Structures are given as structure tokens and as C-alpha cells.
Image (cartoon, grey):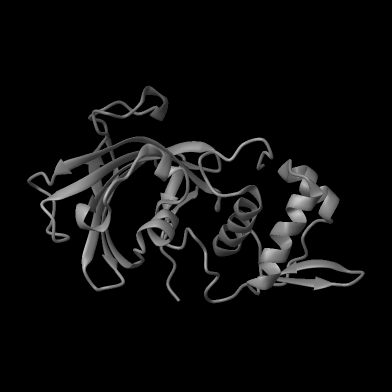
Amino acid sequence: MISEARHDGSLPIYLQIVELIVRDLAAGRLVDGEKLAPERKLAAELDVAVGTLRKALTELETRGLLERRQGSGNYVRAIADPASVYTMFRLELIEGGGLPTARALSVDLLAKPDGLPDFGAAGMAYRIRRQRFVGKKFAALEEIWLDAAYAGTITMQDLSESLYLYYRTRLNLWITRAEDRVGLGTVPDWAPDAFGLSPGAPVPEVQRISTAQDGEKAEFSYTWFDPAMVRYVARLK
């Protein structure tokens, strides 16, 4: 369910609906050619206004992900490149899908600590710590290090939407590819109590090195996730 009254630090409501349907297609919860519920019923299930839902359906149609048949209904279409904001977000609910949202905890400009791989041209980096939610479940923690050469100043207010969307629209930075290494780590000592796993507890860890449109490595990040809630999924085409 997506509440009309909340944005959860994410995208506009109609785009949340779009992204939810994209991820449900990717997870197999919706299949190519499947008919969606009638608009009023679907709007009620998502807890949004019919007008908001129709705006989302129009966006899906524009992207080639929806076919509207007069007198019949709305049918989803699976395409090779759905142009999702969350294309590189690999965590899904155990049952599949789930809209990703985030809540920033802190952002600090710091000297790059020992132990990080080489990335970027500056000696400083912005360290961004976030909570990640999937389907509104607190599922993961992130620590992102963005090379300081890409941004003059980053504030907490800047981090209210998708981080990669912020990179594109505000920093003119496009993350074009990423390498993930999945292993075993431990819950960091800054983890909020609400995470449900104690600091130091063993937990799956994803280390990601991200490359910008200029071919330079721009960012390094850690993600620690709760395997009882989500799984890491990489689909090959």
C-alpha cells in the first residue's frame, strides 16, 4: 500500500506507483500481458486518489509498460529496459518486489579513511548514512562514500529522494555501472535500535564500487541487510 499522505523521503506518489509496478514486473509478481485491477479498486488498494493513479498509468503507458484497451482495461507490458530510478537497487522482499525508500541519518564531509578502495580524485568524500526500507519494512543500512570532487555541498535536505536521481538532476553525475561484492559483514555500531539486529552481529554485506559517465570511479558503498526480510537479487538478461 502507498499512502497518499506520505512520501517516505522518496519520489512523488505517482512515481512511487510506477516504480512499484516496475519492480513487481521484475520480480514476477506481475507478468507480461497481465490485466490490472479496475482503476477505482486499484486506487483503493494503494490508498491513493484515482487521479494520482491515472497519472501513474499515463507514465507507465509513456514508458511502454502499459497498454490501455478501451472497454477492456489496463494490461502491463514487460520490456527490456524499464528506465527505473531503482534499476541498480538489488534488494527485494522475500516474497518479491517492494518499493525502495530511504531515510538519511547523516551526511559528513570527511577525509577518506584507510581501508576504502581507490575512487575519485579528491582526498575527501561525503559519507552518507541511510536507512533503507523495502515495502515500508526497515530492511537495510547503507554507508555511501561519494568523492568530494562531484559536489560542492550536500545537505540532509538534498537527500530526500532517490540518491541516484539526486546525482543526475543536481550534480550532473550518472552512475552508469557498478560492481557488487556480496559477503559476510557485521552490523555497524551506528545502527538504530529499530534495525532489529545488534551492532557486531553477523549480517550479509554488499560492497559496491560505482562508475560515473566519464568512466571514473565516483562512489564506494556498504549495504548491510536483514536476510529475514529481503534478499539480494541480480537478474541476467
Res. 204 image quadrant: top left
- What x and y, as percent, mark residue 103? 44, 37
Q: Which residue occupies 38% across, 38% down?
A: 156
The structure residue drawn at horizontal position 30% and vertical position 26%, both measured from the top left corner, is: 198
Residue furthest out toward the left: 114
User: On the picture, is 113 further left or further right than 37?
Assistant: left
- Please state the horizontal and vertical placement of residue 23, each as a whole percent of the image: 56, 58
Residue 28 visible, this orientation: no
In which quadrant is the N terminus drawn?
Answer: top right
**Res 28 → quadrant:** bottom right
Q: Is residue 204 placed above or below 21 in the rendered structure? A: above
Of 63 and 12, nearer the camera is 12
Q: Residue at x 26, y 31 (%)?
A: 201
- 169 above or below 194? below
Q: Position of residue 153 (x, y in %)?
A: 29, 46
Name the residue nearer the viewer: 160 or 205: 160
Which of the image's four quarters has the C terminus?
A: bottom left
Q: Looking at this rendering, what residue extends furthest in the right direction?
A: 71
Q: Nearer the viewer, residue 178 or 93?
A: 178
Q: Please indicate whether residue 136 sits to the left or right of residue 168 in the image.
A: right
Q: Residue at x 13, y 61 (%)?
A: 121
